[in-house]
Image: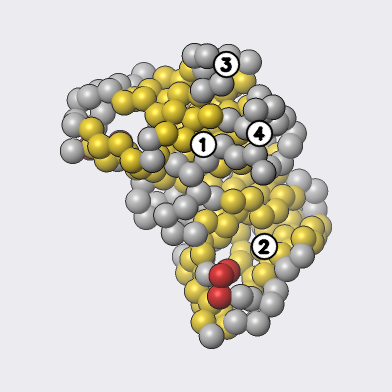
Amino acid sequence: EPEVTQTPSHQVTQMGQEVILRCVPISNHLYFYWYRQILGQKVEFLVSFYNNEISEKSEIFDDQFSVERPDGSNFTLKIRSTKLEDSAMYFCATAGDPSDYEQYFGPGTRLTVT
Amino acid sequence: GQNIDQPTEMTATEGAIVQINCTYQTSGFNGLFWYQQHAGEAPTFLSYNVLDGLEEKGRFSSFLSRSKGYSYLLLKELQMKDSASYLCAVREGNFNKFYFGSGTKLNVKP
């Protein structure tokens, strides 16, 4: 069964550093999403992406964050100048079509900022 | 803004039936989703409602009343593996924005 993959599974970085989280979507999917989940808290929508541009973004997704699809397969989330409060699990999700009701979540990247 | 409420925690017995409620207030409602999330894992899709009524899928059913801003997830014939958090999520607008509740932690005991 096709699945979404994410790398790395765990990233430790120092405050102020930049990190890039990577996601490989299911091959025929065109709609991509990033979510984060701080430990013990709810899943929070960050951004949705289609046709090489952002469709929607939340209040959390400020200038510190950016997304791109650099090579037609990977979908990346870049976090600049990381802060302690960026420590969370970051999930990528993909869908074939937004009218499809099912988003497929990747296993997540645990980001720890020290 | 969005306001999605669900109970924090519930306990039920193996073999029983449990109903997890979710209430929401949102603009541009375009569907309600239920996900299961085991500790340390990603959410997995369970069910979806966009019209009022009951959707059944095996041991899981989900109900929606748009006028009341209310949904529930019904789990039948509970198994120990059903112990997990159950997340209610609302899709808003043109399909691309989702808001999650804080989740209901279900404990299934023998």
Kind of residue at badge 3 = Gly
Marks 4/2: CA–CA distance: 24 Å
For label 4, the crowd category at 10 Å Cα-Cα, with few meaning under 14, some 14 to 19 and many 20 or more, is many
Q: Residue at x 50, y 74 (%)?
A: B107
The chain letter for the residue carrying disc 1 is: A
Task: State the image quarter where residue A1 is shown.
Answer: top right
Q: For numbered disc 2, what is the local secondary structure?
A: strand
Using the image as rendered, state which of residue A110 and residue A27 is in the foreground.
Answer: A27
The chain letter for the residue carrying disc 2 is: B
Give the number of the mark in front: 4 or 1: 1
For label 3, the crowd category at 10 Å Cα-Cα, with few meaning under 14, some 14 to 19 and many 20 or more, is few
Instruction: Tell me: A88 left or right of A74.
Output: left
Q: For numbered disc 4, what is the local secondary structure?
A: strand
Residue A85 vs A76, above or below: the answer is below
For label 1, the crowd category at 10 Å Cα-Cα, with few meaning under 14, some 14 to 19 and many 20 or more, is many
Kind of residue at badge 2 = Tyr
Q: Which residue is mark 4?
A: A95
Using the image as rendered, state which of residue B72 and residue B85 is in the foreground.
Answer: B85
Marks 1/2: CA–CA distance: 31 Å
Q: Residue at x 80, y 53 (%)?
A: B52
Q: For numbered disc 1, what is the local secondary structure?
A: strand
In the rendered structure, find residue A72 and report the number of the disc placed on it.
3
Q: Earlier in the sequence, mark 3 or mark 4?
A: 3
Residue A68 vs A10, above or below: the answer is above
Q: For numbered disc 3, what is the local secondary structure?
A: loop
Task: State the image quarter where residue B94 is shown.
Answer: top right
Marks 3/4: CA–CA distance: 15 Å
Q: Which residue is mark 2?
A: B72
Q: Which residue is mark 1?
A: A5
Instruction: Tell me: A110 left or right of B2.
Output: left
